[in-house]
Each structure stands twice: as structure tokens, then as C-alpha cells.
Image: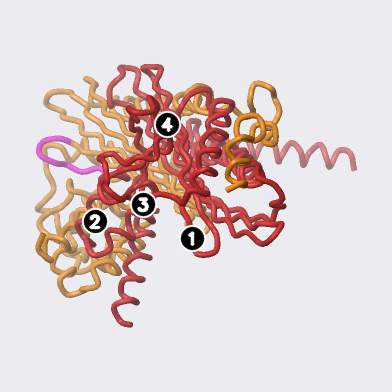
């Protein structure tokens, strides 16, 4: 019992720490954390989001995304061929029924990805649970076309589904990682502005599950609505809030000048008012 | 890796704390390590380095003056000089407490003191004019006059913290001014978003124009940050994901599900 509590405390502190360390270094930070807490490796790998990596499925001639959800040991499963790379004799795969849904979901979200991201890579992985199933919808888009700036967007949508007759309950936990870097005028690390990190949101809905398409439609709508909200939130936080904070640290204009201006305005207003009365 | 190595690595995380969150990160490290005694052995130097990096502002004991804790006014381990009151004092990095003030007039550097005092005066006025919560301390250091500026805004209840830190070193013999400015912002409501930007400057200036040069560079740096924000918002972010598809409508999921997948799922049902 004592060990369980200690692990809990360590996990809570590790997760809080990852929310404070610079997201710019999330990969190195995780590696160091695993060196400090090797006994919690599996828990940390599944709890801490990392930027998605892209792999090539040579067999299918398509790219796919890798993360902890399609990992088994040191191998990763492609959603297109359903095979592990490097190959595994009996790696974890979804049941036949779930695999069909998984294939359909990959097709649907591939279309979604094209319509919103006009490029990028998507992958959907499903896994069986006791009374239900769960899955993750992954999307990655990189924009490094210009010398002056580059960015990348990683969506990680984890969905838990519990079927209840003609309805199903869907619980969505979404994280979007957004990395943006503007280079200095000389194109080097000098004057580089690195504005990066992630936001996480949740949603839960009970929706009708009355035909074969229902899960695709329901998950699709939830993810689309969530990304709509999160895109707005990211824009506001990144380019609104943090920018305001910077300009609150230093004022480009002389603060005493603006204080004088304010005092002048107050005096003027006072004089005008007293003339009216 | 030995336990000792692991604890040393954990302690090292402290140096990456966002502004205003050193205590939170310290508590996380304590919870992770779960061995206060061994952690104590490693954390001392890390805390000292962290405080000096952050330009911690402290009240000088028995003086109505404050000074920044930096590598440039460190007299020896755990002792710092306030050149404005010529006081040397002890500083406990763990409790962040100054104590034991002593006369430090022997530590004044005669050759650069006039320049240092003048720059302290003009930069104090400059900082008051541009930093609503800023502090500047000017020190004589290895033949140069070093000015340290820090401006912090902490609002953890609103899930954000920010810090602006600059160091400007002027060498009167060569007339060279070297500077480095670093800005860090952390937003953490349901997420972890951080701004990290810094810049280095170098120029030749007259001794009487140091303040003007600093003001100019810092103003340009701030403008550069704002320009960068504009570019990231208009170009980089826009290029990643559209607000809506080209159709200007949300997706018709029934259509997508039926069009491509109808066959697959119908087969699944028949099994």
C-alpha cells in the first residue's frame, strides 16, 4: 500500500513538472525523467504527450504516425497494413470487428485531415476494452516552408466509447501541441522567437448509436467541434495572451508620459464637466 | 545510473523553472526524489545558480535599499555586495534571506565607481519609465561596468508568469557595450505554453551614451518580438490548419461515412 502511494505522488509530481518545464525541450525532459524514475517508465510514456513522429509504411506506400498507443515493445503498428515495424510475431492488434471500424475511421479522418490541413498525416488506432473500446485520432501537420518561420501542429484525441444499446457515451480528451518559431533577421538563433506548447480540453457526449456508421459520425463530429474550439483557444492564448504579457513586462513608450496624459485627460474632463454644471 | 546521479539530475531540473515557479518546481523535485536528505546535498549549488540566473531582488539588511543577486556582485560563496550602499551581506539561497550586513567599502572599484554610480542613476530613471515592475542594479566587474535589469510579472492565480532580464556590460577602456536580453513567458491554464526568446547585442558607444544605447537596443528587441508575433499569427499558424474547409461549412460526416466506408462497415455487421 505504501509503495502505491509513493508511485502516485511521484507520478503527480512528474506530471506537474512536465507542465512547467519548457515545452521546447519536451523530448529531452522526458528522457531525463525516465532516467530519474526508471521504475515508472511505462506509466510516464503513456501519460506524457510527445510530438508525433512520422513513419513510412513501405508495404502500403503511406505514412503513419507513431506514439505510445500503437507501440508494442519497440515496434509500431501501421494503421494501413496492420503490421508491426520491426515485425512482431504476435503484437497487439485490435479484434477483427474493431479492425474494420479502425480502417473505416482511418479513411474518414484522412478525408477530414485533407479538408482542414491540406496536407499532413493522420492515423487512428483503436483498442478493445472490457465492455467497450477506445481509440486515438492523431494528426500532424508541419509548416516549414519559409526561412523566417516554421511551425508544427500535433493533435492527439483520445476517445473512450461505452456502448449502451442504441446509444453510446463518448469521452474525449484532446491535446493539441503547437510549436512555432520565428527566426531572427539574420536567420540564425539570434533573435529567435520560440512560442510553443500545448493545450488540453475534454468533452463528453451521449449520442445515438443506431447504425453501422454511427461511431464514425459521432467521433468525427466531436473531434471536429473540439478542434474548432481549440484552434480559437490556441490563437487567443499564443498570439493574444502571451503577447500581452510581454508588452506588460516592458512598455515601449515612457510610462510617466502616459501617466501625465491620463492626468491631463482627467483634469480636462473635470473642467469640461464643471463648465456644464 | 546510481541513486546519487539520479537525484543530481532531478535537482538540475530547477534551472529550467519558469519565472516565479521555482518553489513549485522544487516541490515537484522533492516529490519525485522522495529523499530530502540526499536532495539537500545536491540542491544547494543549484538553488544558488538559479537565484543568480533569475536576478533575484533582495532588500539589503539595515538599509533602505534593494539589490539584485547576480554573478557580478557575488563576493564569495553566499555573500553579495550592494555597491550603492557599500554593504556586503550573507544570502541564504534556500530560504532566500539576506543577513549579517558588513561594511563593503573596500570592495568598491575606484577606477569605475564614478561611471558605475552615474549609470545606476540614469538607468534607474530609464527602468522606472519603461518597466512598471522593474529593477536595475549596476556593478563594477572585472574592469567593466555591468548593468542588470529584471522585470517580473507573476500572476499564478491567472495561470501565467513572465520575466524580462537583460545584462549590459560596458568596458570603458575599449568603449564596447555588450548586452544580452532574455524574455520568458509561461501560460498554464489547461496546458503549458511558453515563449522563449533572447538576443545578444554589441556596439561601440561613448561612456556618456550608454543609457541611450541600452534604451535603443531594448526598444528594438521589443519591437522585434511584436513583429515576430505578427508573422507567427498571420503566416505560420494560418498555414497549419484552416478555420473551416474550402466549402466554408463543417463536414458532412454522414456523407463521408457512407461514401467511403459503407461497404466495410456493412460487412462488419454481417459477421
Q: Which residue is mark 2?
A: A34
**In the figure, the red chain has which letter?**
A
* Mark 3 and mark 2 residues within 8 Å of each other at the beta carbon: no
Label 3 vs 1, first from the N-terminus: 3
Category of crowding for the residue at label 2, using alpha-carbon neighbours closer than 10 angstroms: few (below 14), some (14–19), many (at least 20): some
Label 1 vs 4, first from the N-terminus: 1
* Colour given to chain B in the rendered image: orange
| Rendered residue at 40%/34% (across/down) | A64
Residue in front for this viewpoint, B258 or A29: B258
Report in which chain the residue with disc 4 lies. A
Report in which chain the residue with disc 2 lies. A
Residue A191 figure quarter? top left
- Tell me where residue A228 appears, x and y as whole percent: 62, 38
Report in which chain the residue with disc 3 lies. A
Q: Which residue is mark 4?
A: A152
Residue in front for this viewpoint, A42 or B134: A42
- Tell me where residue A168 appears, x and y as whole percent: 66, 57
Amino acid at each position: 500500500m505504501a509503495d502505491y502511494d509513493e508511485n502516485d505522488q511521484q507520478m503527480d509530481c512528474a506530471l506537474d513538472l512536465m507542465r512547467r518545464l519548457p515545452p521546447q525541450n519536451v523530448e529531452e525532459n522526458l528522457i531525463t525523467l525516465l532516467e530519474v524514475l526508471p521504475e515508472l517508465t511505462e506509466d510516464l510514456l503513456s501519460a506524457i504527450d510527445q510530438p508525433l513522429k512520422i513513419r513510412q509504411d513501405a508495404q502500403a506506400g503511406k505514412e503513419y504516425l507513431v506514439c505510445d498507443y500503437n507501440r508494442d515493445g519497440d515496434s509500431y503498428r501501421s494503421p494501413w497494413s496492420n503490421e508491426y515495424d520491426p515485425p512482431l510475431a504476435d503484437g497487439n492488434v485490435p479484434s477483427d470487428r474493431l479492425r474494420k471500424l479502425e480502417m473505416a475511421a482511418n479513411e474518414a479522418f484522412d478525408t477530414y485531415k485533407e479538408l482542414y490541413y491540406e496536407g499532413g498525416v493522420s492515423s487512428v488506432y483503436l483498442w478493445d476494452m472490457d465492455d467497450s473500446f477506445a481509440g486515438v485520432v492523431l494528426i500532424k501537420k508541419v509548416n516549414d516552408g519559409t526561412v523566417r518561420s516554421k511551425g508544427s501542429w500535433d493533435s492527439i484525441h483520445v476517445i473512450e466509447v461505452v456502448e449502451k444499446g442504441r446509444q453510446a457515451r463518448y469521452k474525449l480528451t484532446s491535446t493539441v501541441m503547437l510549436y512555432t518559431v520565428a527566426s531572427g533577421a539574420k536567420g540564425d538563433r539570434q533573435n529567435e522567437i520560440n512560442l510553443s506548447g500545448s493545450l488540453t480540453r475534454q468533452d463528453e457526449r451521449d449520442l445515438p448509436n443506431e447504425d453501422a456508421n454511427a461511431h464514425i459520425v459521432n467521433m468525427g463530429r466531436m473531434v471536429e467541434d473540439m478542434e474548432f474550439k481549440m484552434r480559437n483557444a490556441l490563437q487567443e492564448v499564443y498570439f493574444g495572451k502571451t503577447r500581452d504579457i510581454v508588452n506588460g513586462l516592458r512598455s515601449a513608450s515612457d510610462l510617466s508620459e502616459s501617466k501625465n496624459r491620463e492626468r491631463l485627460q482627467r483634469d480636462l474632463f473635470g473642467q469640461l464637466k464643471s463648465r456644464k454644471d | 545510473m546510481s541513486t546519487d546521479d539520479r537525484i543530481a539530475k532531478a535537482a538540475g531540473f530547477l534551472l529550467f523553472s519558469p519565472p516565479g515557479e521555482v518553489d513549485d518546481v522544487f516541490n515537484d523535485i522533492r516529490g519525485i526524489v522522495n529523499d530530502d536528505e540526499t536532495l539537500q546535498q545536491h540542491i544547494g549549488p543549484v538553488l544558488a545558480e538559479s537565484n543568480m540566473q533569475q536576478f533575484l531582488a533582495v532588500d539589503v539588511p539595515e538599509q533602505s535599499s534593494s539589490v539584485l543577486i547576480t554573478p557580478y556582485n557575488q563576493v564569495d560563496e553566499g555573500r553579495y555586495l550592494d555597491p550603492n550602499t557599500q554593504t556586503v551581506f550573507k544570502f541564504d539561497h534556500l530560504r532566500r534571506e539576506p543577513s549579517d550586513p558588513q561594511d563593503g567599502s573596500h570592495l568598491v572599484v575606484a577606477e569605475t565607481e564614478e561611471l558605475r554610480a552615474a549609470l545606476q542613476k540614469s538607468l534607474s530613471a530609464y527602468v522606472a519609465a519603461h518597466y512598471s515592475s522593474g529593477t536595475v542594479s549596476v556593478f563594477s566587474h572585472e574592469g567593466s561596468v555591468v548593468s542588470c535589469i529584471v522585470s517580473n510579472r507573476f500572476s499564478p492565480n491567472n495561470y501565467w508568469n513572465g520575466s524580462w532580464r537583460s545584462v549590459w556590460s560596458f568596458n570603458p577602456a575599449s568603449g564596447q557595450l555588450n548586452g544580452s536580453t532574455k524574455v520568458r513567458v509561461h501560460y498554464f491554464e489547461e496546458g503549458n505554453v511558453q515563449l522563449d526568446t533572447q538576443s545578444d547585442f554589441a556596439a561601440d558607444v561613448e561612456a556618456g551614451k550608454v543609457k541611450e544605447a541600452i534604451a535603443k537596443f531594448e526598444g528594438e528587441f521589443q519591437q522585434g518580438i511584436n513583429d515576430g508575433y505578427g508573422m507567427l499569427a498571420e503566416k505560420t499558424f494560418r498555414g497549419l490548419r484552416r478555420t473551416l474547409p474550402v466549402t466554408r461549412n463543417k463536414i458532412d460526416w454522414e456523407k463521408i461515412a457512407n461514401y467511403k466506408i459503407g461497404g466495410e462497415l456493412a460487412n462488419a455487421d454481417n459477421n
